[in-house]
Image (cartoon, grey):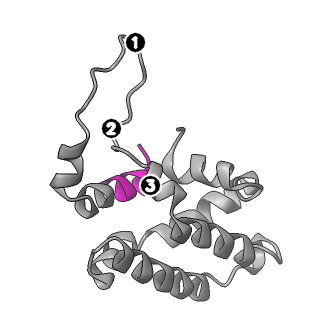
Amino acid sequence: MSRLAAALAGLVLIAAPAAAFAQHGASAPKPGATQSMQGDQASWIADPHMHAFYDLTVQAFAAGPAKVDQAAFQQKAFVIFRDFGVSRHVPPEAMVDHLKLIPGQVVQIAKEDPAVLKSYDNFVAAVFGPQ
């Protein structure tokens, strides 16, 4: 599991109250089925804040990977992360602290494989892992 996926997975566990887990009983996995150790990521993937982060990443790379202003990208990402924290009932600065390495990791991923920015699905696969 990448550090990026691990950080996002950890936050899912922090942000999701135990009551939410209790509402949905765990079903027994099918024999031989691949299981995610990151928990339910669907609500994160569908969240408008993650879409905004993808859009920001695409915008940051618009002039090419060599022209990414990583400091500006990080600061704009932190604004999105603060809003995301509020929407998930997590203190905004706690969300930023938890996700602080993500912008740099996303820049590195996109520089190594620009195809991750071609679609939101590609971005999700790179950030969250295969779904």
Mark 2 crowd level (few <14, some 14–19, many ≥20, 10 Å Cα):
few
Camera-side mark, 3 or 1: 3
Disc 3 secondary structure class: helix
Residue 64 sits above or below residue 33 on the image: below
Say which residue appears at 37% left-offset and 45% top-offset.
40
Residue picked out by circle 1:
32
Tell me where residue 63 appears, x and y as whole percent: 83, 78
Q: CA distance from mark 3 to mark 2?
A: 16 Å
For the residue pair 99 and 55, the one nearer the viewer reads as 55
Q: Which residue is mark 3?
A: 43
Front position among marks 3 and 2:
3
Residue 103: image x %, image y %? Answer: 52, 72
Marks 3 and 1 in Cβ contact (< 8 Å): no
Q: Residues within 10 Å of mark 3 (few under 14, many from 20)?
A: few
Residue segment shown in magenta = 1-9
Inspect the image, locate mark 1, and give the three-letter code of the amino acid beneath it.
Gly
What residue is shown at x 22% (from left), y 45% (from top)? Answer: 23
Q: Amino acid at mark 3?
A: Ser
Identify the residue under disc 2.
37
Q: Is residue 64 left or right of residue 38?
A: right
Circle nearer the N terminus (3, 1)? 1
Q: Secondary structure at mark 1?
A: loop
